[in-house]
Amino acid sequence: MTARTIDPAELAESIRAEIRADLAAIPDRLTVVGFLVDGDRPARTYAEYTRRACAEVGIDFDLRTPRADDIETAVRDASADEGVHGVFVYYPVRDPERDRWLRELVDPRKDVEGLHSFWSRCLYENRRFIDDAGTRRAVLPCTPLAVMKLLGEAGAFRGPADTPLASVKACVFNRSEIVGRPLAAMLANDGAEVTSFDLGGSLVFRHAAGIQGHHVDAVAVDRATALAEADVVVTGVPSRDFPLVRADEIKPGAVCLNFSTMKNFADDIVDRASVFVPRVGSMTVTMAMRNAVRLYRNARLAE
């Protein structure tokens, strides 16, 4: 078996074509404001990717570089500006606690990253719409959403429409509040049983039929057992000390995806996996552009 390798750029381009069509059908030209505080190279690179993605679909991008002491005021001002349709902050800005507060200062109606607690509540309660009529769709965080789209492209979604990942076992190495935890929740919301690993141990996320959200329980499952049973393996460990996932550890035919900027899978993974996605890349920014259009439509439907 040789795995099919998916290039995220190809899927990103097909979605951007849809975004361009959506933008052509709305009366306003959208403006997204990005905030970059320091010279952190990954953040600066991410900002450049955003600029290119906006230009490709026809969204105006305004990158602002305030001092760290001025970032809160700058974010508030952009959120209150009627001419701004989306706000993007390139983290880290300060320490994790203050960055968490900064995410709360972004108006959720302009939060293209989907990181405000309003959107987190929607995600963890599995609320797909924010109105009773079912017309205004919830926004999801960009990287987890990008992973879900790529898993769909890989053929992982095989169940019924309401639980397309029913009977699927997944294993996720990363439980950050930005990517790993929301991703595990999204997988469980769609029916999967997810074993989530981080330095603090392992948790299992299970679909909760008939109620909002999902169940989360501490479990004593080791890496070897989880990998051997997983139909889907997702990694996002930004450390060179992480032991690479090898072909002999995974279930034959598993779908394997890495969203870390560092290598998390051994080269031989393609000899046992059915599909391998080595990176998420441009899909994350593409999801931000998709969210910008969704937020615009939600705002107009609310008028």
Image: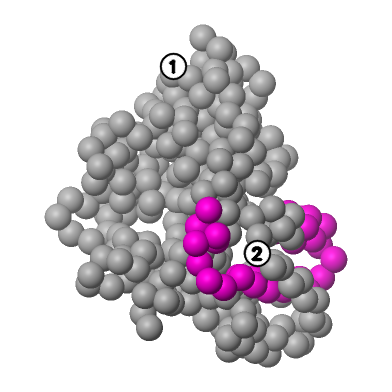
Q: Secondary structure at mark 1?
A: loop
Drawn side of residue 107 relative to residue 137, left or right = right
Kindly report the distance in space between the C-alpha atoms of the residues bearing marks 1 and 2. 43 Å
**From what the image shows, is residue 128 above or below residue 78?**
above
> Dot 2: few (<14), some (14–19), or many (≥20) neighbours within 10 Å?
many
Q: Is residue 38 magenta?
A: yes
User: Residue visible at 58% across and 21% down?
Assistant: 269
User: Residue visible at 24% across and 46% down?
Assistant: 162
Q: Is residue 122 magenta?
A: no
**Amino acid at the residue labelled 2:** Ile
Q: Residue furthest left?
A: 210
**From what the image shows, is residue 259 above or below residue 245?**
below
Mark 1 or 2: in front is 2
**Amino acid at the residue labelled 1:** Pro
- Residue segment shown in magenta: 21-50
User: What x and y, as percent, mark residue 266?
Assistant: 64, 24
User: What x and y, as percent, mark residue 187?
Assistant: 37, 46
**Residue assigned mark 2:** 59
Q: Total number of numbered labels? A: 2
**From what the image shows, is residue 9 above or below residue 246?**
below
Please state, as top left, top right, bottom left or bottom right, where the C terminus lies in the image.
bottom left
**Residue assigned mark 1:** 252
Q: Kindly indicate the quadrant of the structure image that contains residue 228.
A: top left
